[in-house]
Amino acid sequence: MYAQMVKSESTQDAPEKLAAFQARIDAGEKIEPKDWMPEGYRKTLIRQIGQHAHSEIVGQLPEGNWITRAPTLERKAILLAKVQDEAGHGLYLYCAAETLAVSRDELTEMLLDGRMKYSSIFNYPTLTWADMGAVGWLVDGAAIMNQVPLQRTSYGPYSRAMIRICKEESFHQRQGYHIMMKMAQGTPAQKKMAQDALNRFWYPSLMMFGPSDKDSVHSAQSMKWKIKMNTNDELRQKFVDQTVPQAEFLGLTVPDDTLRWNEDKGGYDFAEPDWSEFFDVIQGNGPCNTERLAARNKAWDEGAWVREGLMAHAAKKRAAKLAAE
Amino acid sequence: MTDQSALFEYLLRLGDNTLVLGHRVSEWCGHAPVLEEDIALANSALDLIGQTQMWLGLAGEVEGAGRSADDLAMLRDVWDFRNLLLVEQPNGDFGQTLMRQCLFDAFHLELLTDLTRASDDRIAAIAAKALKEVTYHLDRSSETVIGLSDGTEESHRRMQAALDLLWPYVGEMFTPDAVDNAMHAAGIAPDLTALRTRFDTRIDAILAEATLTKPDSTYAQSGGKTGFRHSEHLGHMLTQMQWLQRAYPGATW
Ligand SMILES: [Fe+2]
Ligand SMILES: [Fe+2]
Ligand SMILES: [Fe+2]
């Protein structure tokens, strides 16, 4: 997911305090920034929300890659609006993280020097216009699977950020699917592009949910705290069940020979992605890790004079105002 | 030149300015110095693309040859573009982008203000809609230019350099030619000399607050809005912008 393999942090707090905290969560109460919370809860949330925010920001790059090559004015406007939304999502999430006493700049530094991660999916290249379709359809589609339940997460600011984000995500997925539809119904070359995009993005999209965590203690703790709402396998299954009929409707083939409807479980059986590839990608060896981080570092470094200039100006204005008073 | 062909040319100028500048600004998406700026730049680009759809849509109607806004954007070559040289200049650093934006916005705002009173209702209506957006663009770009110019030593130096670099492209906006004159006579376009006075008042105030020095030179590069001689930059932009339409002719997207 946007937040993959977030390890929960251990907590040293007194058992009675922990129990009272857990009781609030079990009762469906929202935890607010000023409330007492276990250190492990706070740290896990920072890691998870931060990783989610970074994913929105780095996620601008693969789609931003096609804004200047969009085939029509309307497509250009839609794609630009979509990528702009993702920047907005990053902003909401950084604001939510800041309520946990970590600044946006600190989080950014941790992204830029590799201490914090972002979703593996954004380390794949976008090679054709059909990839704009596949990303909206599959990547935003997978994100929605995770984000919809997170609207009910226990941490108030995170939950409210998710509610705002979810309002925009369905447009993202629809515009992606619409691109795919045009191409799947288009010329033979367009159809080929659409199939090729599905071939390349299918397994990386399945990886977004992370490896199976049904036996993970970290996930169990996060689920108890309601900062993780479902297991990775549950979400992946839901995603496959939703997406396969959509691919059929497009007349495209999911690149999985083992894909079968399983009447008993009421869902599809499907092949697992290659998890060794996943671990390569999150360790920095994906096809675009280097470029993505370099692009973010370049924007940050080359923007330093701008941030400093604007801050210096604001300080001058404050000083002038004080002097006038 | 017939009035109809002058009108077509004039609409291309309006639409190509917003098309080319919108494209340039969209190049920043995902790469701006601060998240808020990234979002704001995308906003401006979106407005400009929307204005392009209206201007070029109307241009296609006036031409009457069945060309849509997309056809005009995606299937003309450099010499058929009618945008100002200013807007095709590369982004450079963030300061250069904002300086270009501010100079264009100040011109654009005055131009649109007059176009809301054009004798052609279609033009007046588009101008009125665009004017609201551009008023906001100028607020933002002028504020940022002022903030950066009156910030640190480095940011001041960069902003002065941006102004010096771009100033030679200001004159073209106000140098009338046969198309401008025909449109002025038809009660559509304003008198560019009067427009320049209002532009100068605005820009002088911004530059004063920004502590920047207006370049002495009045030399003006030209050739953009007539299409006679664009800069080398425009062709490279078109290779990206038009690539899909050129590589897969007739496909719908
Ligand atoms: Fe997203
Ligand atoms: Fe998002
Ligand atoms: Fe999205």
Image: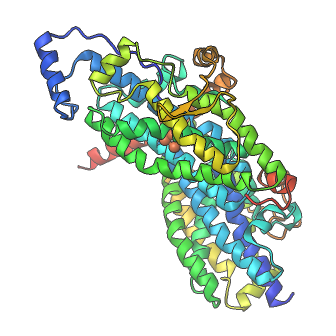
Q: In this view, does A126 lie above or below A107?
A: below
Q: Nearer the viewer, residue B246 or A303?
A: B246
The mark total stands at 0
Q: What residue is rendered at 32% in x and 27% in y?
A: A227
The residue lying furthest to the front in this view is A264
Q: Can residue B225 be seen in this view?
A: yes
The foreground one among B20 and A71 is A71
* Residue A314 placement: quadrant: top left
Residue B229 appears in the figure: no
Residue A293 image point, x, y percent: 61, 25
Spot the residue most to the top.
A12
Q: Position of residue B111 (x, y in %)?
A: 62, 75
Q: Quadrant of residue B69?
A: bottom right
Quadrant location of the C terminus of chain B?
bottom right
Name the residue rendered at 70%, 69% in the picture: B15
Viewer-proximal residue among B229 and A176:
A176
Q: x and y percent of residue A53 in the render?
A: 45, 33
As drawn, B170 above or below A251: below
Which image quarter holds the N terminus of chain B?
bottom right
Looking at the image, residue B38 sits to the left or right of residue B171; the answer is: left
Q: Residue at x 68, y 61 (%)?
A: A73
Q: Which colour scheme is used?
A: rainbow
Is B130 placed above or below B41 here?
below
Report x, y in % for residue B199. Answer: 59, 69
Using residue B217 as the reference point, say whether residue A16 is left or right of it.
left
* Quadrant hosting residue A123: top right
